[in-house]
Amino acid sequence: MTRLVFVTQNHHKLTEIRDLFASTQRYFPHLNRYQLLSLKDIGYLEDIPETMDTLEGNASLKAWTVYRIAGIPCFADDTGLEVKALGNRPGVISARYAGEEKNFDKNMDKVLRELEGSLNRRARFRTVISLIIDRKEAQFEGVAQGTIITEKRGTEGFGYDPIFLPDGFNQTFAEMNLEQKNQVSHRYRAFRKLMDYLNASSMAMV
């Protein structure tokens, strides 16, 4: 059994990834060789500052930080909301858009305030996952296109989910249950690429 650590202290992200991991393993039996662990499982309780200026940089930073300490395969993600009319802000500073306290109600209020009167409300969520195995790094991107609505809707999910309406749906991410969101989200799309990569690697070892 190969241990695989998801580098996050965000329990919402951990819940999503655990659900995605379990559902993907049902379709790819070779992935049963991996055991998904949290940072708590390996006794790592510290927050890792996101000091880079890109999603790719932050994902890589977090993954390498834990890999160098634990020495076992791990992956980390960084996610940003990119609003076209705001020049793709908040982007890499999505969690801190309204301040260092990382209050997402205030973050959403700021986005809605800045979009008042704007006819262009197009936006996308973008996730980058960095995977490190045997001192080698691979990155995977997932994107969900959508629109920023004018008021918060829904109580599920986290982050900017209550104001993001994904293309082709009449529910925000916060109005979807976990199973629904995990079929179309940016994090799902990046994670599925990671799992395809691991599956191909596992099959090559058989």
Image (tube, rainbow, N blue to C red):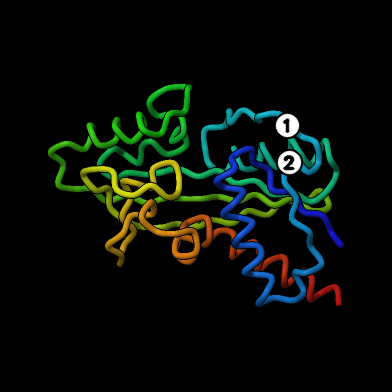
Examine the image and state in which quarter residue 56 appears: top right
- Residue visible at 45% across and 57% down? 143
- Amino acid carrying label 1: it is Leu
The span from disc 1 to disc 2 (Cα, nearest Å) is: 7 Å
Which of the pair 75/3 is nearer the observer? 3
Q: Classify residue 85 as left or right of residue 116.
A: right
Which of the pair 75/158 is nearer the observer? 158
- Residue visible at 77% across and 74% down? 30
Q: Classify residue 23 as left or right of residue 4.
A: left
Q: Classify residue 25 as left or right of residue 174.
A: right
Residue at the disc numbered 2: 39
Residue 81 point in image, percent of width and height: 40, 44
Q: Which mark is residue 167?
A: none
Crowd class of label 1 (few under 14; some 14 to 19; many from 20; radius 10 Å): few
Residue 5 point in image, percent of width and height: 74, 49
Residue 20 point in image, percent of width and height: 60, 62
Instruction: Point out the image quarter for the C terminus.
Output: bottom right
Residue at the disc numbered 1: 45
Residue furthest front in the image: 155
Question: Please, is residue 151 above or below residue 194 in the view?
Answer: above
Crowd class of label 2 (few under 14; some 14 to 19; many from 20; radius 10 Å): some
- Residue visible at 29% across and 48% down? 153
- Residue visible at 87% across and 62% down? 1
Which of the pair 53/167 is nearer the observer? 167
- Amino acid carrying label 2: it is Leu
Query: How many numbered callouts?
Result: 2
Secondary structure at badge 2 equals loop
Residue 196 point in image, percent of width and height: 65, 69
Secondary structure at badge 1 equals loop
Examine the image and state in which quarter residue 23 appears: bottom right
Find out whether the residues at labels 1 and 2 contact each other: C-beta distance under 8 Å. Answer: yes
**Considering only order in the chain, which callout, 2 or 1, is on the residue closer to the N terminus?**
2
